[in-house]
Image: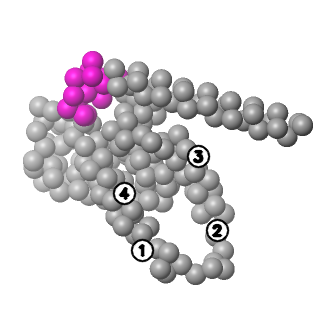
Amino acid sequence: MEINDLIEKVRHGDSESFEPVIRAYEQKIYRFCFFLLGDRQEAEDAVQDIFFKTYQQLAVYDNRRSFSAWLHKIAENHCRNLLKRRRRWLGLLPLFRTDGLSKSAEQVYSEQMGAEMAYWFQGLSVQDKKLLILRVVEDYSFEEIAQITDESASTIRKRFERLKRKLQKKRLMNEEALCHEQRFELR
């Protein structure tokens, strides 16, 4: 059954029809949130919140627009709010930190993944991160991304090319730094 048909059934009181909608988009929205937030648990919680918000707001959804684009916009706004909240908490966290607390293996892994993602995402705007996730991770076409972001496909394509050059330059700089370190160690 088509997504818009399922949405119409939900709008008319058939809440069971929302489950296939969730199944159709759950993994895509999870990956989108994970790459924006950098934390598995936070992304899982965000997905639940996003689908709850989506369900609540179905009455305002305009079915002339792509449901995927609308859902990604809800996800983006939700993640932006979480990131703002996280920045505020990070400012307060040192006031409450106690030394000697051990971390679980999951926390260490999450921090390592977050550090790797943070390296590549460092210096990128939320807009660039979103573009990278939608194009590379989710494999959306430029036209689909244009619908999600309310921009033209040519603008998206140009921004993506600039982003690729920026990341390639960063990779080359990283490789040069590693080669320099290795030469220094050999001496």
Q: How is the image coloured?
A: one colour
Stretch of the chain drawn in magenta? 141-157
Task: Tell me the quarter of the image containing the C terminus.
Answer: top right
Q: Secondary structure at mark 4?
A: helix
The numbered mark at residue 116 is 3
Q: Is residue 144 magenta?
A: yes
Which residue is tagged 2? Answer: 104
Q: Is residue 165 above or below residue 183?
A: above
Quarter of the rendering containing residue 149: top left
| Crowding at mark 3 (Cα within 10 Å: few <14, some 14-19, many 20+) | few
Q: Which mark is residue 92?
A: 1
Q: CA distance from mark 4 to mark 1?
A: 14 Å
Residue 150 image position (x, y, % from top left): 20, 32
Query: Which kind of residue does numbered mark 3 sit on?
Result: Glu
Q: Earlier in the sequence, mark 1 or mark 3?
A: 1
Cα distance between the residues tagged 2 and 3: 19 Å
54 on left or right of 186: left
Point out residue 67 in the picture as x, y percentages from the top left corner: 22, 37
Q: Nearer the viewer, residue 90 or 78?
A: 90
Q: CA distance from mark 2 to mark 4?
A: 23 Å
Residue lying at 41% horizontally and 47% vertically, measured from the top left: 36
Percent x, y of residue 116: 58, 46
Give left or right: position of 15 versus 81: left
Q: Amino acid at mark 1?
A: Leu
Mark 4 vs mark 1: in front:
1
Residue at 26% over, 58% down? 52
Q: Is residue 181 magenta?
A: no
Left or right of 23, for residue 12: left
Q: Nearer the viewer, residue 19 or 46?
A: 46
Of the image marks 2 and 3, the number of the one nearer the N terminus: 2
- Mark 1 vs mark 3, foreground winner is 1
Residue drawn at x 13%, y 36% is: 63
